[in-house]
Image: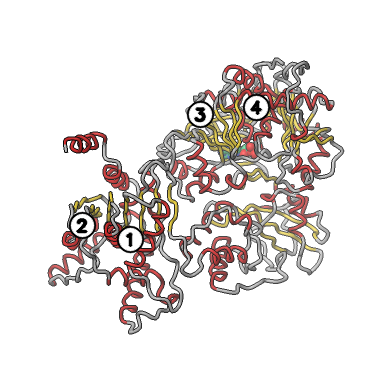
Amino acid sequence: MSASIITILGQFEQKAWSTPDSVAVVCVDESVTYRELSEQATRVAHALVDAGVRSETLVGVFLDRSVNLVAALLGIWKAGAAYLPLDPGYPPDRLAFMLEDSNVGFVLTEHSLAGSMPSTSAQIICAEDLPGQTPGHRSLPIGPAADQLAYVIYTSGSSGKPKGAAICHGGLLNVIRAISEELGLGVSDVVLASASISFDISFLEMFLPLITGARLHIVDRLCAADGARLIEALRTSGATVILGTPTSWRLLLEAGWQGSPGLQIISGGEVLPASLVRTLSGMSKAIWNHYGPTEATICATTELVRADEGKVTIGRPLANVRVYVLDQDHQQVHSGEIGEMYIGGAGVGRGYLNRPTLSEACFLLDPFDPMPGARMYKTGDLGRVLRDGRLEFLGRIDGQVKIRGFRIELEEIEEIIQQYDDIQSAAVQAVERGADDYRLIAFVVSRTEKPLIGLKEFLRKRLPWYMVPSEFITVEALPLSPNGKIDRRALKDLHIKPAVVDQQSVEQPSDEVEVTLKAIWEALLKVSPISISDNFFELGGHSLLAARMFAEIERKFHRNIPLSELVGNPTIRELAARIRHSVRDGDWPGLVTIQPGVSSLAPLFVVHGLGGSLFSFRALAAELGPDQPVYGLQRPPRIAAGKNRPTIRALAAKYIEEIQAIDPVGPYNLAGHSSGGIIAFEMAGQLRNSGREVKLLALLDCDYPAEPSVRSPSAGRLDTGLRGARHLLRRCLEEGMSVVLKRKFHHEKIKLRYRLLRLSPHTSSFHPRIFGMEAYLALSAKEYVPQPYGGDMVLFIAEESLEMQPRFGAGWARSVLGRLEMLEIPGTHQKILDLPHVTRLAQEFQKRIHPPQAALNDTLAACSID
Ligand code: AMP
């Protein structure tokens, strides 16, 4: 078959012809070459043509993200048809509406999914039933023309029903080719795809690489919502391009992403805040801000954003695209004046499927384009042209909102709520509940006094999850404006009745784990009371809040549970069981992978400090490079009542067992920060005593434990006091008063507990919950007497600690019999592990773990002389 090169399909076929054996798509453990993908698409096309599909026939695609999905989309085009994406994760009623409204005659799916399709008169074709061989003798239609329909995609509708935007091939190719050129994509690029097929950004993800000869790497649904897994996918795929919304970047950052120097970040879908750009810059090769509505084919303008510019704009129109800022009379406003943005040129869609009136209202004749019949799309977005010609986005003129990148018409939700029996009227608002945390709140006027049990379930069946409000508030009446419409501004001031949906029974926590989790949820979700059987997502939880919740779980329970566990355990009861199971007394998995690296390199093992968290080592791991494996030894969560407090010797012995499970023979690289250094020191001693080699023993700002505290004379005390005050003041100025004071308060609390513990006559019979693990560890560290160590050691001293404690390091000199190096690193005790100081630390580690080739050659030469 011949496909015209004025379509994505044609461009893809050209690549399949010129680079047939290059890998086109990787998804989980499956991968296909360009030739294989093209052949698979051809088989789909033949099956469709045989079934009766003709030019522009709409074919539904009910498939999860997979190689089959990409082949299905290309195959539909090869048959001359157009596709309608049907996300299997969508509620059945919404899918049924889309099937009926679009009147699709065929749906491509798989056997495993066919059962969950809503009933339809469309003919179902399963991927597994396609012929295994390409029928060689039969030809397919000539590839689609530029003005032919490529796809229909449904978006939220203000009339109360979703509407299908119809997009043509020419516009799609124009957008994708323009972006590919802006990014400078080539065959060595890898695009990581994580979006659902319900959103057109997924087509950009898929076809950007496929028209360039690059590689498409698809991640599954769970990975897309889990920052830690996404970081891992970025690393393992070698991705050079990632697309997403600002929410995606926050998710990555909250999961501890340290950046990828070769990565181009494409942000779109909603406002990209300047603060986020500042955080992301320096962590990637480039950050792009894309703007555009679905109706004008994915993207209309683009901007390469820079952190040193205070304002983030949406840039300039793509090649062959025009953006006008118009007043109410459709006249262009002057530069700098605010108006509504209209989009003309190549990407303007055909209109809404089967909605002539709505199409006429939104797709207008373009009076500024000399081409006869040219049209422009009325976006509903406010904007202005800046002096340098770039465009600034200034919000909406209507009720459409964006929450975490999802386009939502509030009227659509209101319409569905009003279909519920007991509801008289409803209004929905997007309310900011915290930093980057927007929720949908429904104000409802009920016909009855009864609680509205069942309303949420009703909505869940009809709306995608991101459109189901997280809070419902019953009100006497909705405020109306003089013209009888809902007065949305006045909604906020409504007298709020506490009677909320689904409040029939609040199940109380049954133990400490559940109590703690409930407190974490209430603080994060700002909802109270919470029942232990409530679902996190239904209470307004979303991926960003989930990341924060898991960070709190780490802090409180010292357990690093994968975020994906929340999907299967979305209630407090289930999550608590998961935590309890993983924190059985004396059975804590001590070893945590901070960075898997490559197995050919000797790992670095880092030991927790008093606080126990291993989060602080992530920057060090990243600076050591992605190939370096780094494992963390995490402290026991607590001591079982009646059990003995672990001594440093016992902890070290336990950790040696853990590291030998990974690397039984060594040589070993060990490091510990703060009190963790003492444990690393003891581990190194025990390893050497058992005949093992320790290549690196690095202590990071670790005080000598058995040193008697020396009281300075009063003049010296005054001097130290003044230095201390100066130091504190500087920290407050640099890091913010509340952060420094919080930390100081925490330290003082541990110190107090530690002192109490020392005074306790029964230090062997413990009350673990009273004093906390930190105080026990502080006592064990203080009691530890270092034995002489026969190997070498390097002691990194934070310059700003040195300023506070000039005697630092003297004790270690007595206990290290080999070479003791003392190196100063700029920063405070904690900051030496953060950027920029950690870079220097990592360089020093590198020198010792992987000595430069010259030094290695010297060593080898010395060996051969011997
Ligand atoms: P959608 O059709 O889901 O792509 O949503 C399109 C709408 O999202 C636009 O009309 C804007 O209101 C908003 N939008 C898209 N990209 C951006 C951006 N980069 N900055 C601000 N708003 C955006």
Q: Secondary structure at mark 1?
A: helix
Point out the tag, 1 or 2, that comes first from the N-terminus.
1
| Vertical position of residue 366 compared to residue 127: above or below | above
Q: Position of residue 114 (x, y in %)?
A: 78, 42
Q: Residues within 10 Å of mark 3 (few under 14, many from 20)?
A: many
Marks 3 and 2, how far apart at CA: 50 Å
Q: Nearer the viewer, mark 2 or mark 4?
A: 2
Give the crowd class for mark 4: few <14, some 14-19, many >=20 residues within 10 Å: many
Tell me the residue that label 3 is attached to.
189
- The residue labelled by disc 1 is 676
Q: Where is residue 519 shown, x and y percent of the image?
A: 54, 68
**Residue found farthest to the right:** 121
The amino acid on which the numbered mark 1 sits, given as a three-letter code, is Gly
- Front residue of 500/760: it is 760
Residue tagged by mark 4? 37
Foreground: disc 4 or disc 3? 4
